[in-house]
Image (cartoon, helix red, strand yellow):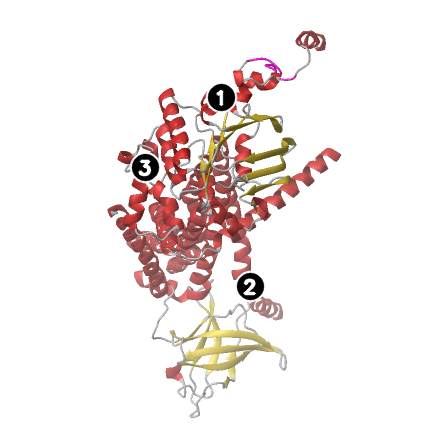
Amino acid sequence: MDDTPFVVVEGLHFSRGDTDIFRGVDLSIPRGKITAIMGPSGTGKTTLLKLIGGQLVPDAGRVLIDGQNVHGLSRRALFRLRRRMGMLFQSGALFSDLDVYENVAFPLRVHTDLPDAMIRDVVLMKLQAVGLRGARHLMPSELSGGMARRVALARAMALDPELILYDEPFVGQDPISMGVLVQLIKRINEALGLTAIVVSHDIKETLSIADYVYVISDGHVMAQGTPQSLDVDQDARVSQFVHGEPDGPVPFHYPAVDFFTDILSAGANR
Amino acid sequence: MIGRIQQLGRYGCDLLEALGRAGIFLGLSSVGVPSREGWHLWLRQMHFVGVLSLAIVLVSGLFIGMVLALQGYTILVDFGAEQALGQMVALSLLRELAPVVSALLFAGRAGSALTAEIGLMKATEQLSSMEMIGVDPLRRVVAPRLWAGFVSLPLLTVGFSVVGIWGGYLVGVEWLGVFNGSYWGNMQESVDFIADIGNGIVKSLVFALVVTWIAVFQGYDLVPTAEGISRATTRTVVYSSLAVLGLDFVLTALMFGELG
Amino acid sequence: MKRSKMMELGVGLFMLAGIAGLIFLGLRVSGLNLAGPGAGDTFQLQANFANVGGLKPRARVTMAGVNVGRVVNIELNTEWYDAQVTLELDDKLEGKLSRDTTASILTSGLLGEQYVGLSVGGDPETLSDGDTIRDTQSALVLEELIQQFVSNMVNE
């Protein structure tokens, strides 16, 4: 297999208003592997996915997908590139006016000229893979959160993409559906050999499926490596995150003046 | 003081930027290649914004026509000119009331619903996911709604006029006893197809574009939270009502100004 | 599938109703007559008035109280400094109006709109398209009437 990285992020800067979200992020996502991007909430992991998908434009730096500069493409070329990607949104983002079957069929209908019978076969195959072939007539409002995410996964796979972006796939799931999703992501990746980027802060689940991990904090890559190497990383910040300790280099307290002085000064001002 | 001027300047820049965004938005979403799929989406929106607004528009038209006839009669009868009732009802409906009131009702009924619907799609990431599937939501979601609004408001306005004139007939002729022939005769004498009916329709076309544009843009541009949606819905109704009333003055001055 | 058929039917009815409404407005409300005057079968006459008062384009032209045409244009004649009014009349009258036909500006009711009334004379020669009516009566202007009335009072 071609061993050039599928996605390359170079010197990415992005700010929203006055706050810098990324100050020089470099990533290289290998082909055919699951790469996890982790970090405490609020570090802009979803923003990073939107930058990779070309929905947001960075202030500086570039994103290359299979050698193409995402933000240098025309609107038309960008939409063409996106057909080779699938994205699983945090909420599933199923189209609420279409039923499960039509949701999965949607990418096929807009991008291919396949006859209805063939679309039916593909859709049922994808739904079978996520175990929801029987739910094809339900509307998205009738699905549980975990089921909605599985349907969304089937939809993201409908066009057999080369790259799948997972945005917080495990958040807010009960242990059973979490287990189902973990297994699905792993299995799909092995079966189809596609490149996957998983953005998450669920450490245990993510480390169990990832081949390579980036930890992002404060706008840049804080640590990277295989799950095993991160687990034994000596860096205090990495170890706080990986082992989920409440206080450490990432402080429990929001930055403030000394508690004692704060209390006293309030009295003095009165 | 300086701070206030700065704030004013920033507000002005924001306004200009929003206008620019809205303009680009309109440009990108109105140039869609019509397709079979697009036709179907448009039909669905016609049903949503047009057919479902029909009841409220027609009932309002009926009552406004009836009230016009009643009020007009009490004034005209003082001058012994109650024969001119038909003319008065028809002209005020065709030139002013039908386009303006239909547009206001449309903004409240369909405009706010469009904003909320698109806003909800944005909040639940449906628009983003559509983009990631490689479908332009401006074409798929916004354009059919824009065109449906543009086509249905003029039709609703015509319905409003017809029902209003009939309501005026019910009150004026059937109830107050104005001579049937003079109700219709005076009306036919004074109403010009191009100058009155045509201009009324031109007005409603302009209102349709503005109201639908505001509604879909507010939906597309909102902050994707529950609060953002409720604010944007309010803004749709407020902005489009103001725009309709303001534009109505400008259009009236242009169309009927020198006739005066 | 059935639901979407119903929806299409609804939209179709809606559009049809809109178009029917427009036709109703055209025929019943604006009195648009597809076969009547308006397309080709009219002829034009000029008439010069010293004062047109409140006469406006689109005003009626009547004869013995019957509608026979309308005013299409009013402009100032810079040769004589009077108002040149163009009338559009029903084709049936072409070659029937005598050369000494009188055109006068009349008011319907006390506050009503002004219109042009025609009355035929006895001349055997007739007016044809583009001719000018010589015998005209200007509009009554209220201020002039009052002035006349007051000066008469003073003279007595």
Residue A120 at what x, y percent from top left? 29, 45
* Along the viewing direction, whichever of B11 and B63 lies nearer the viewer: B11
Q: Quadrant of the C terminus of chain A?
A: top right
Residue type, label 3: Leu
The magenta-colored residue range is A246-255
Going 63% across and 41% down the picture, which residue do you hit?
A: B14
Disc 3 or disc 2, which is closer to the eye? Answer: 3
Going 33% across and 42% down the picture, which residue do you hit?
A: A102
Q: Which residue is mark 2?
A: B258
How much space separates mark 1 and mark 2, taking CA atoms?
A: 75 Å
How much space separates mark 3 and mark 2, taking CA atoms?
A: 68 Å
Residue type, label 2: Glu
Q: Residue A254 colored magenta?
A: yes
Q: Which residue is mark 3?
A: A127
Q: Secondary structure at mark 1?
A: helix
Residue lying at the far right of the rendered structure: B2
How much space separates mark 3 and mark 1, taking CA atoms?
A: 28 Å
Residue type, label 1: Ile
Give the chain letter at badge 3. Answer: A
